Image: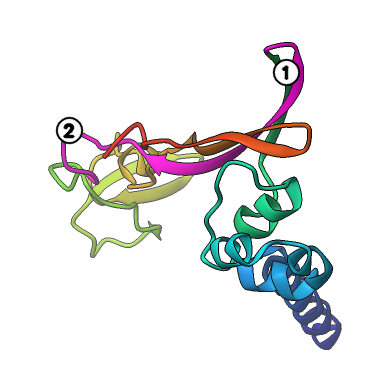
Amino acid sequence: MMRQFLARTLTFGIAASALILASCSTTETRISGHPEIYQTLSPGHQALVSQGQIRAGMSQGAVWLAWGSPDRKIVGNMRGRSTETWIYINYTTYPYSYPYPYYGPGFGYGFGLTSVGVATGSQHHHGGRTFVFFGSPFYDPFYYSYIPPSIPYPYKTVTFANGRAVSFQYLVPPYP
């Protein structure tokens, strides 16, 4: 029974690792995976794509090779022409103005010592059992733990008209 559990756990771990590694794409892996797109580019565009850079006039394929798949696509209209804007999302954390985590009075986890008279913590009785707690009973590990919120923001965009890049932007993160 334990052997089956370990085999399933190992299989799941290998599958999850393969999925994570396969989802990571770099400029080099995109170029080597699609050399037919790369070969159609001019030498100047090939040099930019190899460095992960773009410029106006590039095709959607060239931008995809340089920057990868966008997180969002928005269809629009600019000067009577239909456009498509690709948005790339990054994540940042909000800078707290006070130190986290809070390690002050009341910090502590409850040790589950039951019916032991050696402990010096406060004793509580409930349902015929005696529980001993160390630290504050109001300590909340979820409130005081340092898991900063992840805040998504667009960090670069490119707009296409007639299949060619007409504008692109690099955006500053909202928090330093």
- Name which residue lies at 55% across and 47% down: 55
According to the picture, the residue beneath numbered tag 2 turns out to be: 97
Q: Position of residue 88 (x, y in %)?
A: 58, 41
Q: Position of residue 19 (x, y in %)?
A: 75, 67
- Name which residue lies at 35% across and 38% down: 140
Badge 2: residue crowd in 10 Å (few <14, some 14–19, many ≥20):
few
In this view of the protein, can residue 26 be seen by the observer?
A: no
Q: Secondary structure at mark 1?
A: strand
Eyeballing the image, is 87 above or below 81? below
Q: Secondary structure at mark 2?
A: loop
Stretch in magenta: 79-101
In this view of the protein, can residue 163 be seen by the observer?
A: yes
Q: Nearer the viewer, residue 32 or 126?
A: 32
Which quadrant of the figure has residue 124?
top left
- Name which residue lies at 72% across and 47% down: 59
Q: Nearer the viewer, residue 92 or 86?
A: 86
Q: Earlier in the sequence, mark 1 or mark 2?
A: 1
The C terminus: image quadrant: top left
